[in-house]
Image (cartoon, rainbow, N blue to C red):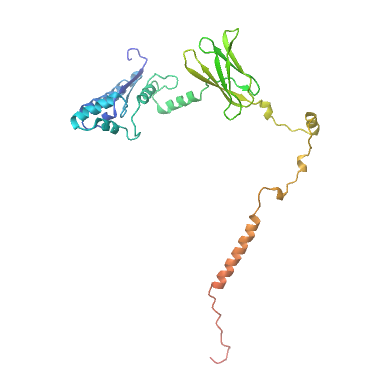
Amino acid sequence: MIAQGAGGAIVNIASNAGKVGYPNMAAYNASKAAVINLTRSLAQEWAEHGINVNAVCPGGVDTPMLLSVAEWITARTGRDPHMLVKEMKPRQLNRHVQPIEVGRVVAFLTTAAPTWNNWARQPSFAVSMLDLAAWLLGAQPAEESVQVGTPLEVRLDAAAYQRRVRFLPPADQSLASATIQAQPTAEGVLKAAFEATLAAGIYRVELARLEGSAETRHFAVNVDPSEGNLAHLGAPELASRLKDVKYRYVRAGGFQYEGSDAAGYDLSEAMLYGLIVLLLGEQLLAYSAGYHPRPARHAAQGGSP
């Protein structure tokens, strides 16, 4: 990599044992700790060459090696190997790590997935997440959208697909599905058309490849956008469009709102009066229950004591 001058990525498979250190596994712990420190040294040494060096440290991975390690420990401790395997679960997950999960981390740290990740070339978490979000939100190839009532057509490569095509309407619509045999066209492709697009929604098309695998495509069937257009019409324009329809034309200003037409009852005024009565009653009760001494009588001037 250094001689080529193009940079690159190196991923070493270490272990959590190299960071924690488990009993009865001193040699294994030391070897994995050596891999971790080797990774740290090379990462600093080769960074100037554009080479990223990382180490993946999984816990107990669900592989035959896990049982072999448990049996090796059993020979020295006498414990049940199957019980040891159950204990070798990462506490955070409470289950064994699957090999595919380790593979995904390795792919993320290398150039194995350049379409959605550039960590190997630019090891920055923020930049990597932005690149990943851009890839997820990027323009994906989408099937053509059609309008309600328009036949839904599917064109297939005759060298890759079987002629059987199954159309499934939206699940929330009471429309029947249909299985159609695609017909060859002059262009050398297979064509199948579904006529009963009577409702808007997502239609599924189930296909079968010649090698036996299945494929599902989705088509969006929408209503005519012009149906949502809103416009102000006067009496002459409305009459010209509704010639055969009986209707009554009333201007908006001719409608008057009646309080009695409102849904439910307005209890705010009654509650206000009730609150006033309650407060007055509270004051009267407090006054009647309170102590009010009589005012002292003063002797008239010049009178006897």
Residue lying at the far bottom in this picture: please name it: 304
- Direction from residue 125 to residue 55 in the image, left or right: left
Figure check: 47 above or below 185: below
Query: At x 19% / y 28%, what residue is drawn?
Result: 75
**Residue 25 seen from this side:** no
Q: x%, y% of residue 7?
A: 36, 17
Q: On the rendered structure, is 44 left or right of 143?
A: left
Closer to the camera, 219 or 75? 75
Residue 14: x, y in percent?
29, 25
Residue 27 in picture, x, y percent from top left: 21, 27
Q: Quadrant of residue 97?
A: top left
At a point 66% along the width and 26% down the height, the residue shown is: 225
Q: Is residue 287 in view? A: yes
The residue most toward the left is: 76
Quadrant in which residue 242 is drawn = top right
Query: Dividing the picture into quarters, in which one does residue 275 lie?
Result: bottom right
37, above or below 2, in the image: below
Position of residue 275 in the picture relative to residue 75 (left or right): right
Which residue occupies the foreground of this view, 190 or 18?
190
> In the image shown, does 290 or 125 lie closer to the viewer?
290
Frontmost residue, 130 versus 196: 196
Q: How many labels does the image show?
A: 0
- In the image, what residue occupies the spot 57% across and 73% down? 288
User: In this rendering, is residue 259 above or below 74?
Assistant: below
The x and y percentages for residue 181 are 57, 14
Quadrant occupied by the N terminus: top left
